[in-house]
Amino acid sequence: MPPWCLPSDGCFDHQFSGFSVWLEPEPFASRPLQDTMHELADKCGGKECGLTSFAPHVTLLYNIRLEDTASNDGSRNGGGMKRDGVGDAETTRAYDLLRRCLREYERHVDSSEPIPMNATRYYYFPYPKICDNSRGFGCVISMLLIEKNRQLQAFHDAAKTVFPPDERHGEAGGSFQPHMALVYAPEQCGKEL
């Protein structure tokens, strides 16, 4: 176990909440990237330090509360969105919204066109818990910045149209910067990245 990975203060312990909308590249094409992500996580302590595996993806929206979505009749309705039990209602609602998002995207872009996800540069930054009104993750985030193209922008715009405001682009007013996170590492792990 790396010296900074102490249960008292060196592990990544952020609990993600809500739902996120993202695009994943083809699994076969992204295999080398997935391998690199695993290597980075292992360098930074792996599971013993709270790092979990996730698929390469470009996040369109982050931390959405589905109970804030409009029902099929257009009214705001959280009645079927309770977090008791398996969550089948939330899952069904999420898939319904994703289908609506795809239809909205297809109104503006030919969906048979591939969606390029070209990295423009590597970037990492510390994101302590005190950031963003104490919503920081308490880690160092390593990522690839992705070229903003019309397909990614159209998907982001479609997602914003269909889903309720997310944590980054809703009231916070953040702009869309396509990126692929590689690892969320303990704050003491910056030199490993």
Image (tube, grey):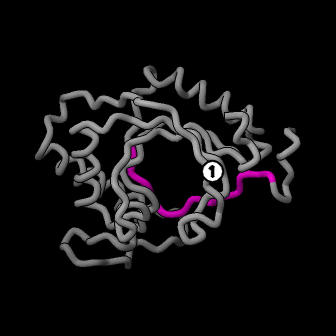
How many callouts does the rendering have?
A: 1
The quadrant where residue 191 appears: top right
Residue bearing mark 1: 126
The quadrant where residue 166 appears: bottom left
Q: Residue at x 24, y 53 (%)?
A: 157
List the single residue furthest toward the left. Answer: 107
Percent from the top left, x then y, of residue 163?
30, 62
Q: Is residue 91 left or right of residue 104?
A: right
Q: Is residue 36 left or right of residue 28?
A: right
Percent from the top left, x then y, of residue 115?
28, 31
Dominant secondary structure of the magenta stretch?
loop
Percent from the top left, x then y, of residue 77?
32, 78
Residue 9's place in the image compared with 171, above or below, is above
Percent from the top left, x then y, of residue 176?
34, 51
Image quarter in which the N terminus is found: top right
Out of 124 and 75, give the one closest to the viewer.
124
Mark 1, other Cα within 10 Å: few <14 / some 14–19 / many ≥20: many
Q: Residue at x 66, y 34 (%)?
A: 193
Magenta part of the chain: 10-22
